[in-house]
Amino acid sequence: MRNAFADELTKLGDTNPELVMLSGDIGNRLFDKFKAAHPERFYNCGVAEANMIGVAAGMAMSGYRPVAYTITPFVTTRCLEQIRVDVCYHEVPVTIVAVGAGLAYAGLGPTHHACEDISFLRSLPNMSVICPGDAWEVRAALRATMDQDKPVYIRMGKKGEPVVHDGVPADFAIGKALTIRKGEDVALLSTGNMLPEALATADLLATKGISSKVVSFHTVKPLDEACLEEAFSSFKLVATMEEHSLIGGLGAAVAEWLADRGMPTEKLTRFATPDDFFRLSGEQDFAREQLNLTAPQMSQQLADKLNS
């Protein structure tokens, strides 16, 4: 995902002279092409993320389109006050891009885990929250962000994630989910880098005679309410899938949406990380297995629920 982001950013920089890149002391080689093409529009802000967000807000107020980038907890938790007061309060077009969301950096320990950021960012007024499902959705999200004038948070994985789309989705729009596969029994609403796992879950359910619709719910705020209406009116079960805490993520947003409309919640199953820190040592695949976020684990739980 991060390579696609850097490449798309360079292309957009070629056509948008207001686009400015700010890095939190990361990705220097990743952005070599951008720096070579636009050396006056790349700023390494160092290990000073709060200052980076303040600088980005000031640039946005001056007519620029800043993109601030670094590892997820450092561009969210560490500088939440600046995002809230400098960016969201003034409703300026700052794009905050986080790399290594969820448990992508599981092996580096709790300082690099990021399972609360959707909750933090979607609670802020004026902020949109986008979690692309693959590298092509990263490109589409960045393009869509440059076409509007509000704060946006883009939450990415790291590198090497499976590619789901054949190219940039032509119908990608902020706040509009993408149907990846049609089905009849279960609706799997995936956000972020869980999309390949959702497709694998659908494959395993198919071996049990269960038909699954797979949706890339790439925007957590604003929610695609029309998609939710269709899912809860047409399917026996609706499952949300995310590499984020049960508290405040996509599943929580969907549960809030149901509660606000007085709708029953029996159809909803939420797959997410628990309200706890992940304290074991291991890489992302190991972490997912420990937290019951693998396709075999999720498909079995859904099949058991359907047959109960």
Image (cartoon, grey):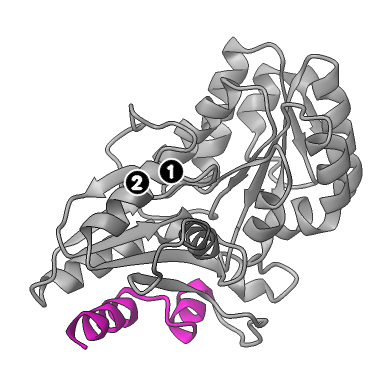
- Mark 1 secondary-structure assignment: loop
* Secondary structure, magenta segment, majority class: helix
Residue positioned 70% across, 52% down in the render: 123
Which of the pair 21/228 is nearer the observer? 228
Q: Residues in magenta?
A: 283-308
Q: Which residue type does callout 1 highlight? A: Asp
Residue at the disc numbered 1: 224
Label 1 neighbourhood size at 10 Å, few (<14), some (14-19), many (20+)? some
Which of the pair 298/85 is nearer the observer? 85
Percent across and percent down for residue 67 are: 70, 32
Q: Which mark is residue 83?
A: none
Above or below residue 173? Residue 266 is below
Report if residue 46 is visible in the image: no
Report if residue 217 is visible in the image: yes
Q: Which residue type does callout 2 highlight? A: Cys
Question: Could you tell me if the residues under marks 1 and 2 are in contact, i.e. CB atoms within 8 Å?
Answer: yes
- Mark 1 to mark 2 CA distance (whole Å): 5 Å
Above or below residue 291? Residue 134 is above
Label 2 neighbourhood size at 10 Å, few (<14), some (14-19), many (20+)? some
Which of the pair 5/153 is nearer the observer? 153
- Left or right of 304, for residue 108: right
- Left or right of 59, for residue 300: left
Quadrant containing the C terminus is bottom left
Residue positioned 43% across, 82% down in the render: 292
Residue positioned 58% across, 64% down in the render: 102
Q: Quadrant of residue 283?
A: bottom right
Percent across and percent down for residue 298 are: 33, 77
Magenta-colored stretch includes residue 266: no
Residue positioned 16% across, 56% down in the render: 183
Percent across and percent down for residue 230 are: 28, 49
Residue at the disc numbered 2: 227
Percent across and percent down for residue 143 are: 51, 26
